[in-house]
Amino acid sequence: MRFTVRRTAAVAAAGAALLVLSACGQSAVESSGAAGGESGTVVFAAVPSEESTSLQQSYQSVISLLEKETGQKVRFQNATDYAAVIEGMRAGQIDIAGFGPFSYVLAKNQDAGITPVAALVDEKGDEPGYQSYAITVNDSPITDLAGFAGQTVCFVDPNSTSGYLYPTAGLIEAGVNPATGVTPVFAGGHDASALAVASGQCAAGFAYDSIVDTQLIESGQLKPGLLRTVWKSETIAGSPVAVASDVEPQLRQKIADAFTQKANVDYLTANGFCASADTCEVGEEGGWGYVTVDDAFYNGVRRVCDITKAESCTSLG
């Protein structure tokens, strides 16, 4: 089965975000004119959901497709965190970015011209979306979110959609204050959060669905049956690819069309961008391909922001 991209959004102050962006490399700065297509280069940034040294390889078929469809060279940027990506888009240094749902809403708040064009789906015909899980070890006495009260609880980070925002809304609705009713620990990644619960560092925690159900088990990092899910969020809108506000309209349309019409296993395999459907990688977790989304699709994230009144809903840190 293929799994969609679900990334964490690392917390960072705006100043730190700019430092991180600078650390991304001179290439991002050099291609700042790419948004208008003048330099012949566009910058595509993404943030890994886990420790990864091969993120560009996962996107290579899509990168090759974008280069063919737009006539531009695509420079891929393995970014450190979403705060840097948001700042990079605002500064004209990043043209295309893979966001988490929450980080997209933050980006849109910062720059209304940022446009979501597509989101990855597991299988052809699917709707882009996933769930946040609340987890404990299998023999824990905790059976629901109310049982998290007074416990050490692992979150991902304060800017994570499924690793913090939806979990805090769930805790509030269960009568638990996520700030004072638990001892919060920010693990920094969905994999780290789940593994911290498995090892007993946290009594309970949160991570997105496929990290718990399959990814850590298939990688051998988590023993099957060790973790138990005691709560599942509503479906969260899938992580979007968005285009910067200063990308000129004709190029923006070419990018959108490439993602929604051709960036899928069927087309990429049939047209030589992938050797076979079995080995074709589309995005970090190897989904089937991309489908069209719009800004209204992320209103559920905004609703959860209204519930939580989270400070991170209006700022980068």
Image (spheres, rainbow, N blue to C red):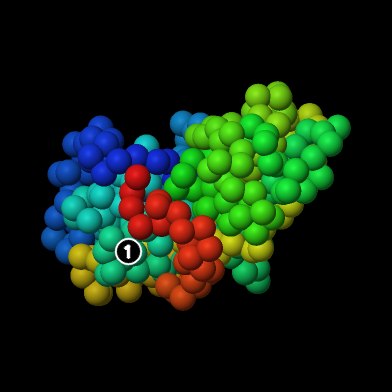
Q: Quadrant of residue 137?
A: top right
Q: Quadrant of residue 257?
A: bottom left
Q: Is 39 situated left or right of 136 in this image?
A: left
Pick the front one: 41 or 4: 4
Q: Position of residue 52 (x, y in %)?
A: 49, 33
Amino acid type of disc 1? Answer: Asn
Write the residue at 54% across / 47% down.
Answer: 164
Pick the front one: 198 or 255: 198
- Assign the C terminus to one quadrant of the image: top left
Please give the residue where the numbered disc 1 appears in the rendered image. Answer: 109
Task: Note whether 308 is above or below 155 in the view shown.
Answer: below
Write the residue at 69% across / 46% down.
Answer: 134
Report whether residue 140 is seen: yes
Write the residue at 68% across / 41% down.
Answer: 149
Report whether residue 292 is seen: no
Q: Residues within 10 Å of mark 1 (few under 14, many from 20)?
A: some
Q: Position of residue 304 (x, y in %)?
A: 53, 63
Q: Secondary structure at mark 1?
A: helix
How many numbered discs?
1
Task: Note whether 283 is above or below 266 in the view shown.
Answer: above
Write the residue at 46% across / 59% down.
Answer: 309
Task: Note whether 166 is above or below 196 in the view shown.
Answer: below
Q: Is 307 situated left or right of 315 in this image?
A: right
Q: Position of residue 213 (x, y in %)?
A: 74, 44
